[in-house]
Image: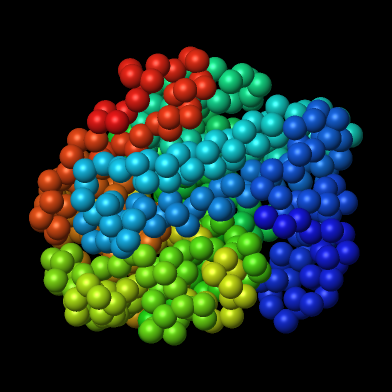
């Protein structure tokens, strides 16, 4: 990745005033270039030295370094998880994900690359957590916020790791210099995640200081999702309700497919009323979101550099066939026969007409949006109470009504009128699948609820191999980390 000199950052600022997203990027660059000229490097070398952590600018630059590897890995992570679902398919080398038999050598290597990016983000977070207290000239409140941001990102990354790989080495600020770190249990990893988020929640601001930074509400949302994963429905419900009652978020009104594409996921957006936390990307070579290029097909004209159409859907899949017409999210899918038959579907959720190349899409990548938070609350409340309460039912209906272009806050003819608990939980699971296409949620939800085998068989007619549920621990980790055993510490089937 190319670095930016002070001059090129200033030049970028002057030439980008036509685009609000570019203004944000350039403004951030101007704030930070005095700390490190190479802030757009994935891993600025200076952050590893203790004497770097002196000023507020130093700390900001160190925190920024956490984001780079996490931003770069997110597009591929979401694409792979989407192929694991009951509705998505991969093409080319990615087609092997459709078989549900685990990874072949090519995709074992691809998984290792994602692993490395996640651990690079964790390493940079650990350095911030360890060294920020050294910056004694920086106000304590600022230091605490930087540490909180690093802990939020570390928790988010370990949440990705534990759900996809299971037990992994637990690298923290306390063992950041150690190479040989044993494989921790999932319980140990979740303990760190919860501790990190509890501390982050206390020190993060109520409202993000700038778009793309975590807030107190982002920490509560992530923690609610963690507790949902752990089946602690009381805590999940309480935290989700706190976010809902904050009044800081609302669903973006829509009336067309174009509204979804531009008002929720558009490349010119800095933020929206429903964004709780998102990774920011810029319409700039090497700084863009890779997912629009991965997903789009040249014939649709939705991406000005064509697209790889590496992931797609199928109109004969029961998931799609049973999806109600009139749902604007269904209309994101268009039939494009690129050699796999006239039922092949390509998704147009992420559009970008002005990207400079296939690495420069300006679309941000949502991690948590308000509709998902509403569904987390609805599920946690129902599982906790063992009943369908009016508040939970309304949360579900708000997401559904918005998808049909209706006001989420007014009664409608399409409202669910559900009293049966199992039917309600089914509706939540399905509504979340519709709402979070290509956001990397469905496969993890199917695993969490123990329903992956059921839905993959129903919608794809495939039995899932046991080895497919967890990704392989990279051979490089097993070979060079002497605290791990290549046989006993590898995941089943590899």
Residue occupying the point 51% across, 63% down:
290
Give residue 253's position: percent from left, percent from top: 43, 77
Compared with 426, 339 (above or below) is below
- Asked whether 268 or 407 is in front, the reply is 268
Residue 225 in sight: no
- In terms of image quadrants, where is residue 449? top left
Q: Residue at x 46, y 64 (%)?
A: 291
Single out the residue that lies furthest toward the front. Answer: 105
Choose between 215 and 156: the one closer to the eye. 156
The answer to whether 10 appears left or right of 252 in the picture is: right
Residue 430 in view, yes or no: yes
Please tell me which residue lies in front, 81 or 325.
81
What residue appears at the point 86 percent right and 30 percent down from the top-left corner?
A: 51
Q: Is residue 433 above or below residue 133?
A: below
**193 up-or-down from 35: above or below:** above
Q: Quadrant of residue 151?
A: top right
Residue 91 x/y as whole percent: 31, 62
């Amino acid at each position: 990745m190319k670095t930016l000199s002070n001059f090129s950052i200033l030049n970028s600022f002057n030439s980008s005033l036509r685009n609000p997203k570019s203004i944000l990027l350039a403004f951030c660059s101007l704030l930070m270039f005095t700390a490190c000229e190479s802030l757009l490097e994935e891993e600025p070398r200076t952050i590893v030295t203790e004497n770097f952590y002196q000023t507020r600018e130093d700390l900001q630059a160190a925190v920024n370094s956490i984001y780079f590897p996490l931003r770069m890995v997110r597009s591929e992570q979401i694409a792979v998880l989407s192929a694991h679902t009951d509705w998505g398919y991969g093409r080319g080398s990615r087609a092997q994900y459709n078989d549900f038999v685990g990874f072949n050598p090519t995709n074992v290597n691809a998984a290792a690359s994602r692993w490395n990016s996640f651990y690079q983000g964790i390493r940079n977070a650990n350095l911030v957590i360890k060294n920020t207290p050294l910056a004694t000239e920086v106000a304590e409140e600022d230091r605490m916020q930087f540490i909180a941001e690093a802990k939020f990102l570390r928790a988010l990354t370990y949440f990705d790791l534990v759900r996809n790989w299971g037990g992994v080495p637990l690298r923290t600020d306390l063992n950041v210099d150690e190479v040989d770190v044993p494989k921790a249990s999932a319980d140990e990893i979740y303990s760190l995640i919860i501790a990190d988020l509890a501390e982050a929640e206390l020190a993060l601001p109520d409202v993000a200081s700038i778009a793309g930074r975590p807030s107190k509400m982002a920490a509560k949302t992530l923690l609610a999702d963690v507790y949902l994963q752990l089946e602690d429905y009381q805590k999940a419900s309480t935290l989700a309700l706190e976010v809902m009652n904050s009044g800081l978020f609302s669903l973006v009104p829509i009336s067309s497919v174009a509204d979804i594409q531009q008002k929720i996921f558009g490349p010119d957006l800095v933020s929206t009323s429903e964004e709780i936390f998102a990774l920011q990307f810029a319409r700039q070579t090497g700084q863009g979101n890779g997912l629009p290029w991965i997903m789009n097909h040249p014939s649709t004209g939705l991406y000005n550099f064509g697209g790889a159409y590496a992931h797609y859907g199928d109109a004969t899949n029961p998931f799609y066939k049973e999806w109600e017409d009139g749902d604007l999210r269904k209309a994101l899918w268009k039939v494009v026969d690129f050699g796999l038959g006239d039922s092949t579907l390509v998704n147009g959720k992420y559009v970008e007409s002005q990207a400079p190349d296939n690495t420069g899409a300006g679309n941000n990548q949502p991690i948590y949006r308000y509709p998902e938070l509403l569904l987390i609350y609805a599920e946690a409340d129902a599982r906790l109470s063992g009943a369908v309460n009016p508040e939970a039912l309304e949360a579900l209906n708000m997401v559904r009504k918005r998808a049909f272009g209706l006001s989420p806050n007014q009664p409608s003819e399409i409202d669910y009128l559900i009293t049966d608990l199992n039917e309600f939980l089914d509706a939540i699971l399905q509504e979340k699948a519709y709402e979070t296409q290509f956001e990397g949620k469905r496969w993890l939800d199917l695993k969490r609820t123990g329903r992956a085998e059921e839905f993959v068989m129903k919608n794809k007619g495939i039995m899932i191999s046991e080895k497919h549920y967890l990704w392989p621990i990279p051979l490089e980790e097993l070979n060079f980390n002497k605290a791990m055993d290549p046989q006993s510490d590898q995941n089943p089937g590899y």
